[in-house]
Amino acid sequence: MSESFRVAIIGSGPAGLSAAAHAAKLGLRHVLIEKTDHLSDTIFRYQRGKHVMATPSQLVLRSDVAFDAGKREAVLGRWDEDARSAGVNLLLNTEVKAIAGAAGAFTLTLSGGKTIQAETVVLAIGTQGNPNTMRCEGGNSPWVQYSLDDPAEYVDEHIIVIGAGDAGIENAIGLAADPEQRNTVTILNRSADFARAKDANVKGLNAARDAGRLSILLESSPTKIEPGFMTVETRDGEARLPCNRVIARMGSSPPRKFIESCGVQFSSDDREAFPTLSPTFESTTPGLYVIGALAGYPLIKHCMNQGYDVIEFIAGNIALKPADEPILEKKLTGLPGRRSVAEWLDFLRERVEILNDLSPLQMREFLLDSDVRAYARGEVVFQRNDAGSSLFGIAAGSVLVEVSATDPSITVPIAQGSIFGEVGLISGRRRGATIRAAEDCILVEVSRLAALKLMASVPAAKRAINRITTERLLLQMFGSGLRKEDLGPLVASAEVMTVRKGDCIIKEGEEGSDIFAIRSGSMVIEKLIGGKPVFLSYLPAGSYVGEMALIDNSRRTATVRAAIKSDVIKLDGNAFRWLLSVQPELLAKAKRDMAARRDLNGFIESKKDSFGGVIDLYSSVATFLVEQGVGEATDVLLIDETLCVGCDNCEKACADSHDGLSRLDREAGRTYAHLHVPTSCRHCEHPHCMADCPPNAIHRGPDGEVFIDDSCIGCGNCERNCPYGVIRMDKVPPKKPSLLSWLTLGLGPGPGEPSKAWSYKHAKSAEAPKKAIKCDMCAGQSGGPACVRACPTGAAIRVSPEDFLSIALLDRSGG
Amino acid sequence: MASRAANRGALHEGFLRHNGFRWLKIASVLCITALAAYLLVDAEPRPNGGTAVGYALGTIGALLILWLTMLGLRKRVISRGRYSLKAWTSAHVYLGLSLITIVTLHTGFQLGWNVHTLAYALMMIVVLSGIWGVIAYGTLPRTLSANRGEATQGQMLEGLRLLDRQLHDAAQPLLPRQSEMVRESLENCSVGGGLYARLTGRHRRCGNARALTAVKAELRAGRPDPGQRLSLIVSLLERKEAALGQARRHIRTRALLEVWLYIHVPATFALIAALTAHIVSVFYYW
Ligand SMILES: Cc1cc2nc3c(=O)[nH]c(=O)nc-3n(C[C@H](O)[C@H](O)[C@H](O)COP(=O)(O)OP(=O)(O)OC[C@H]3O[C@@H](n4cnc5c(N)ncnc54)[C@H](O)[C@@H]3O)c2cc1C
Ligand code: HEM
C-alpha cells in the first residue's frame, strides 16, 4: 500500500515551500515533492550572487518561512534552514508524473513508478515548464544535459550544443571562449539560419566560427547518440561526430499540458491564460489547488502568502482575508460611496460589461493592476495625442468623446458599462480623441498588462473588446459624420486577420476590392517601377488601404506588405461601396486621401526618370529602416553618419542625465547609406520587453516613452525579450566629483559613464542590485532627449516612423 | 504631411545649415554693421581701438571671445532645459568667423610687436584652427563611416586579438627561427602608436608587415612546410594586415577629427591670457 497524506504539495518554489512549512506548523500530514535535488529550482537557477528583491514592499509577508531581499545564496540558505526546522516532509529528486482520482483520494504517480495517496493536492510547479528533450536514440544518455551552469567547468571535451535560440548560442560561445579549455564545440541547428536569436548573439557566434573556435552545422539534426559519438543527419547525408557531451537547449514546453492532464481547466485557449480558480485557489477539480506563478502571481512574496493561505483554506479557515486586502483598501479609499473592498469588487464587476465574467479571485487580481477613480463633470480623462495604452471601463456615469480635433463641442457619448481607450491598448498608438466626463463618474483604469491578462482569461471580455475596437477604429478612420448605426453591414463583414512580417495583403496588378484597416502593427506600400520594387510609403496602425482599386474599379496599383506582425481588419468591398454610396461625405474624404496618394505615386514616378538613383537610394534606405524594426517603433534615434564626428557626446550626455549609466551604444548597430541605427530603444508600439515582467515595472509614459520603474527586480526577462538588445543589467555607479573639480583639478572620471574599474574602486556599499536599464527618452527633463540636445553637429536625430519613412528621406538623399 | 516633412528636414540640418543658416545671417549683419560704422564714422586722428567705434568693436570682440569659450562648458554640462548644442556650434562657427572682421577693424590695422598684437595673433590662430576643424567635421565623417562599415572600434580590436591568438596557436609547431618571425607580428605591431603614426596611419617597421615578408620569403625559398602551416600563417598574416589597415584608418580618421582641437583649445587659453593683458595694459596706460 502506498503512503497517504492529508495534503501533497508539488513543487518546492516559494509557493510550495511556504505551503509545506505552514502545513508542518499546523501538524497536517503532508509531503513536499520536488523534482530536482534542491529546493526552489527557479531561484536556484538565478545567476550567482543575484540580488533577490522582495516586492511589492507594501505587501506584508505571511509565511512560516522567512524572506527578505538579499543575495540568492542567502535566501536559499535561509529557506533550507527554515524547511528543516519547520519539519517539512520533503521528497527530493521526485517528479510527479500524473495525478488521478478526486478530492479525498488522489493518487500521485511519481517518477520511478511509485505512487502516493493524498486527500488534497496543491500544485505549485511554477511556469518554467520542462525543457524539450532529445527524442533520438540515446537521447536519455547521462551525458545529455539541458542546462549549463558554468562553461568553465568543462575541459578537453567534444561538446555538441543543440538549438538555435539565444540560450544555445550563448552556451556554445561560452564553452569555446577560452582556448585553454581545449573543447571542440559544435552547434547544431535544424534550420538554415538563426532567425530566432538576437542579432548580437548571431554575430558573436559567426565571429567565433570565423576565429576557428567552434563549428556551426546548419540544417542538421541528431539521429543517434552513443558513447563518444553522435550521428547527425545533414543536408549532405549522415555524419558521425565525436561527442562526449550534449547540451540540448531546444526551449521548454510550458507545464500546461501536464496540468490539464491532471484535470485542471484553463480559462481559455490563449497562451497567456491561467487555470480557472475559486477564491480559495481551488481548481475546477475539487480538492486540487493551484498557487504561485502558475496561478498568475509571479512575485516571490505573493507566492509565499498564497502558500500560507491555501493551507489555511484546506484546514478549514475559509474566512481568512487575503494579505493584499490592505493594498486594495488603500486603492479604494477616497472614492464616493462607503463600500467595503468586497462590495467595491462586486460593484465594478456587475457594472462594467467586460468584467462581468470574472471570478472573485480574478477580480481581486485584476484590481491590483488597475485603478479606480472618480471624475467630476467636465474633467478631462485624457487628451487627444496623449500617449497611453490603458483601457477605461465606466462603472458609473458617462463620458463624452471629442471627435473633432478643432471643435470641442462636437462630441459622442459613451455610456455606463462600456469601455474606452481601447485603440491605444490595441495599436499602441497615441490617443485619438480627448475624453471628458459628461457627469460625475467612476472609472476603472485598466493597465495594459491587466487588460491583456483579462482578454486572455475571459473570452467574453476579449470578444467585447474586439467588437468595440473594430467599430471605433472604423468610425475614427472614416471620419466625422458617421455613426455606429451606419457601419452595421461593414462591421458584420469584418474579419480580423493576423499577417506575418513580410506577408502581402494586397498584390500589385491583382483584382480585388476588399479594404484593409490596420488594427495593430504597420504596413509598407511598394510599387514596381522599372522592374524594381520601390518603397512608396509607410502605413501606421489606424489607417486603411485598398480603396483605390474600389473607387476606380481598377486593379491593385501597389503592393502592401506587413512591416511587422500586424492585425488587420478585412472589410468587404461591396459593403464599403454601399457605405460610400450612402455617405457622400465619406466618398469625398476617400477621394481626397486617394488624391494625396496618387500625387505621391506620380511624384515618385516622375522623379524616377530624372533621378533614378535617388529613388533607388530612398527606397533601399526605407527598406533598411523597416528591417531594423523602425516599423514598430514609435520613436527611434538615428545618426546621420555624414555628420557624426564620433565624439560620443550623445552617450556621455545620456549617462550624465541618468545616474551615470548610458542607455545608448552609439557605435554598435546597423548602418546603411551612412544612416546609422544605434543600439538604443525604439519605444515599440507593442514593447517586447513588457511581455514578461514579474513586478509589472515597465510602462509607457505620458510622452510615449517606455520606461522601467523602481520596482524592477533585476530578473533580466526584458533584456532577453528585447530583440534589439537595448536593455542591459547594471548597477548605479557611485557619484562622481563635480564637473568643475574635474575641469580644474582633474578629479574623477570626467563626463560620461565612469569605467567599471573606477566604479568598483569608489563603490560605497558592497551590494547594489543590478537592475534593468533602458532609454526613457529623458522623460521629465525639459528640453527632450539629452542625446539629441548634446550632439554638436546635428547628426543625432529622434524620429517617429511616419515622419521619417516619408518624402523627408528623399530630401535627404537628394542632398 | 507636407508641413511635417518640412519640419523633419529642419531637424535634419547639420550645424552649418542650422535653422536655415540663421547664424550665418546674423554674423553677416554684424560684420556689415561693423564695417559701416568703421567707414562712416569719421575717427580722429585715425581709426584705432581708442575711438568710440574702436571701443565698441573691442567690447563686442572680447565678449564674443568669452562666449565662444563657453562652448567647452556647454558641451559638458548636461543640464535640463531647452538647448541644442548643434545651435551653439552653429553660432560658434559663424560668430567666431565674424571676429575676423570685428577685431581687425578694432585694431584699425595698427599692428606691431606688442601684447596687443599678440592677442590678435592668438585669436587668428584660434580662428584658423577653427576653420580647419570645420573642414575636418565637414569631410571626415563619411570616411569614418565608410571605413568602419558596421564594426565598432572595440570589435576591430577584438578581431585583431583573435587573429593574434590564432597566429600564436598556428606558430606552435614551427621551427624556432620561423616562430621568431611570427612573434614579430605578435609583439611589435600596434594599432595606435605615437602621434605621427596616429595621424598618418603609417607604421614604419610594422611587425606584421615584416613577419609577412619574412614568412613569404620562407615559402618562396621552398622550405619544407609540413601540414601547410606556413601557408596558413601567411593567410592569417594577410588577414591581420587587412584588419590592421581598417583599424588604423579608423584611429587615423578619429585623430584627424580631434587634432585641431589640440591647437584650438590651448590657443584659446593663451588668447584669454593675452586678452586680459591687453585690456589691463590699455586701461593702465590710459
Ligand atoms: C531570473 C529571474 C529573477 C527573478 N527575480 C525575482 C526577484 O528578485 N523577486 C521576486 O519576487 N521574484 C523574482 N522572480 C520571479 C520568481 O522567481 C517566480 O515568480 C517564483 O519563483 C515563482 O514561484 P513558484 O513557487 O510559483 O514556482 P517556482 O519557483 O518556479 O517553483 C516550482 C518548483 O516546482 C518544481 N517542479 C516543477 N514541476 C514539477 C513536477 N512535475 N514534480 C515535482 N516538482 C516539480 C520545480 O523544480 C521548481 O523547484 C524572478 C524570476 C526569474 C526567472
Ligand atoms: C576666438 C575665437 C574662438 C574661441 C575662443 C573658440 C573656443 C573654442 C572652445 C573653447 C571650444 C571647445 C572645445 C572643446 O571643449 O571640445 C571650441 C570648439 C570648437 N570651435 Fe571654436 N573658438 C573660436 C573660434 C572658432 C571659429 C572661428 C571656428 C570655425 C570656423 C570654430 C570652430 C569650432 C568647432 C567646430 C568646435 C568643436 C565643437 C565640438 O565638437 O563640440 N571656433 N572653440
Image: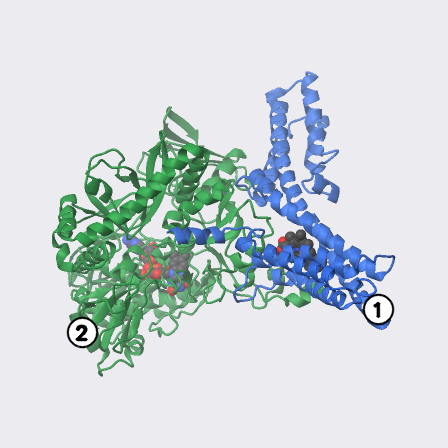
Question: Does residue B139 appear left or right of residue A574 in this picture?
Answer: right
Q: Name the chain letter of the residue that bears numbered label 1.
A: B
- Quadrant of the rendered image containing residue A420: bottom left
Q: Position of residue A246 (x, y in %)?
A: 41, 39
Above or below residue B180? Residue A792 is below
- Which residue appears at 66% of the width and 67% of the height? A740
Residue topped by disc 2: A346
Amino acid type of the residue tagged 1 in the rendering: Ser
Q: State the residue position of label 1.
A: B281
Q: Position of residue B26 (x, y in %)?
A: 60, 59
Residue located farthest toward the bottom when viewing the structure as drawn: A338
Count of marks, rendered view: 2
How many residues crowd mark 1 within 10 Å: few (<14), some (14–19), many (20+)?
Answer: few
Q: Nearer the viewer, mark 1 or mark 2?
A: 1
Q: Colour of chain A?
A: green
Residue A184's spot in the image, x, y percent?
Answer: 50, 35
Q: Which chain wears blue?
A: B
As drawn, is B223 to the left or to the right of A553? right
> Label 2 is found on which chain of the structure?
A
